[in-house]
Structures are given as C-alpha cells and as structure tokens.
Amino acid sequence: MSHKIKPILATILPCYNEEEILEKSFKALLLYHQELIENGLIDAKSFILFVDDGSVDATWQLIKKFTQKSQLVKGIKLSRNQGHQIALLAGMRSVYGKCDCMVSIDADLQQDYRAIEKMLNRYKEGYEIVLGIRNDRESDSFFKRFTAESYYKLMHLMGVDIEFNHADFRLLSHKALGYFVQFPEHNLFIRGIVKLIGLPTAKVYFDVKEREAGESKYTLKKMLAFAWDGITSFSIVPLKLITLIGFIIFLISIGLGVDALYTALFTNKAVPGWASTVLPMYFMGGIELLAIGIIGEYIGKIYTEVKRRPHYFIEEEIL
C-alpha cells in the first residue's frame, strides 16, 4: 500500500546539553525542510520537534528562540534528565496523531540528514518503517569501531534482534508509530522494539560526518549500560547461562575431585585438605556472586516495571 505523496513529516531531535552545536543543527535542518516543502516532497504542515532532556546549559533557551524564528519548529522540555531513549519516547508520543510519518535523528546531525529524502521515497513506496544504516565506521577510532562491532555481535549472540550499524535514525509511519506507543515498558530499547512491530521495513544507507562542535554525550559507561539494558530487556540468555555454568562447574568439580584423590593416593605432594577446600570455595563463591548479580538485574527491572511510575514529566512545551 502506498502512502501520501506529500506527507506531514515530524522530525524529532532529542537534545542534552547541546548548546554548542544546536544553532548549526537548527539552521541546517530548517533549510533542508524548507527545501523538501518547496520541492513538494512533504506537506507545509511538517515540523521539527526539539526535545530537551533536562539540559543544564542554554539548550532550552536556544530551542525557544528557534520556535520564535520559525513556525516549523516546536519544543518540549522534560523536567529532568531521563536519558536519550526516554527523551525520544516523549517526542514520539507528542507527534503521534499530528503527522503522517516521523523521523528521529541525533541533535548533532552527524547522521546525514539528507538521507531523509531517501527515507521518504521508501515510505511513499509503501514501507511503514525505514531504518537508517551507516555505510561504514571509517571515521571512528579503532577502539570505538571495535567496541561498536563487538556490541552488535554480542547482542545477536544473546538472541536480541537488532540491525547491524543502525542506531536511532529511522522513519516510522503513522501506523508503525501507533503500534510503537502501545509498548508500556520502562526499560526502553527502542531499536529492539521497532523490530518487534513487524510491519514492512526498508533500509537506507548514509555516511556519518564528523561532529562539528561539542562532545558526544555517549560515554563508554553509558554505552555499556545501554548495551546491558538491551540484552536484559530482550533476552533471557544470561539466565540460561547460569544453568550452563552450573553444569560446567559440576563437571569441573568431578575433575578436581579425581585429581585430588589421585594426588593423595599416589603422590607425596598433596597438602592435606587444601585442594578439596580452597579451590571449590573460591570457584563457587565467584560463580554464585555472578549468578546473584545477573538475577538481581532482572529482578531490578521487574521492580521498575511493576511500580508503573511515569516515564517523564514535561515541564514546558511549545507546540
């Protein structure tokens, strides 16, 4: 099924302490949207939504200035920093029912925003979801490229269905967005949820540009936490690994027991009681702590979900 030739497009940009780059992003994206409107690719009612994720710098003041300069720009300010995924969720919920399709993109515009036209073309062909896939990671450092590639491999190994080299640059139709907003979970891993929707999906490839100003807000600590959230939100493989580890320990224990018995009976090198006491104690202690930690992570997520606290509060909005 094909979609509208001139859809109302909502472009969502989550922002956190982006005052150094936001002015450039605003100007570039505004000119591009005006170009799309003039070329008849999107409706004149299309708009850009900046979501301030509780920034402590001048990000919100800049967003308010942008809304005064152009009717194409709208803004939402969350009451506190909730993280990129929650900020994106707030934007997606806000635009639902107000557009024919939406595109999410990072505020630093390192993702090539001109790929939006390609996404629109696939949308008009009838696709409900269009994923932005980066062409390569040549611009990344060796460490970042290695950790990113390892991350995707680990996710697949754990049974999480995500697209390689796809982050949060994507287009969702009104129908796909309607399906998405029905997911009530608090432990958000949006790129995983999008794959669960199951509607016709296409891919668009783009190049990543160098960041022109400011610093990336995704530190190694945050990336590791994000990866762990993705695994524990979509996979029970870590829990199954505990059973596997228990079986392996059982086999190792048999081997250690045989070795200790052989040493005691046929050699004079045995220290009485050492092998049978110390080795199993340290080994089992470490495994038990690991197992308790993994189970605790899942229990913690259940605890968060059952409380059903609001995902966020909107302190101010300009719509």
Image (cartoon, rainbow, N blue to C red):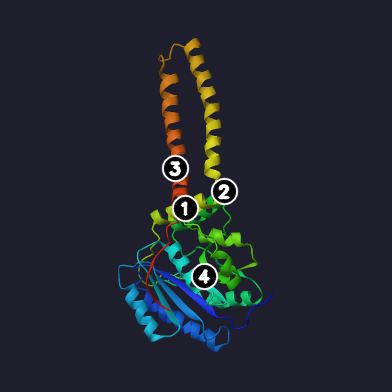
Residues at circles 1 and 2 in contact by the CB criterion of under 8 Å:
no
Q: Which residue type carries mark 2?
A: Leu
Q: Which mark is residue 82?
A: none
Quickly name the residue at label 1.
Answer: 305
Nearer-N-terminus badge (1/2): 2
Nearer-N-terminus badge (2/3): 2
**Residue 153 locus on image (x, y percent):** 55, 52
Q: CA distance from mark 3 to mark 4?
A: 40 Å
Q: Nearer the viewer, mark 3 or mark 4?
A: 3
Q: Is residue 208 visible?
A: no
Q: Which residue type carries mark 1?
A: Glu
Nearer-N-terminus badge (3/4): 4
Q: Is residue 318 above or below residue 55?
A: below
Q: CA distance from mark 1 to mark 2?
A: 25 Å
Q: CA distance from mark 3 to mark 1?
A: 14 Å
Q: Residues within 10 Å of mark 1 (few under 14, many from 20)?
A: some
Q: Is residue 252 above or below residue 8?
A: above
Nearer-N-terminus badge (3/1): 3
Q: CA distance from mark 2 to mark 4?
A: 27 Å
* SS category of the residue bearing label 4: loop
Q: Which mark is residue 157?
A: 2
Residues at circles 3 and 4 in contact by the CB criterion of under 8 Å:
no
Q: Which mark is residue 296?
A: 3
Quickly name the residue at label 4.
Answer: 207
Residue displayed at 66% across by 74% down? 126
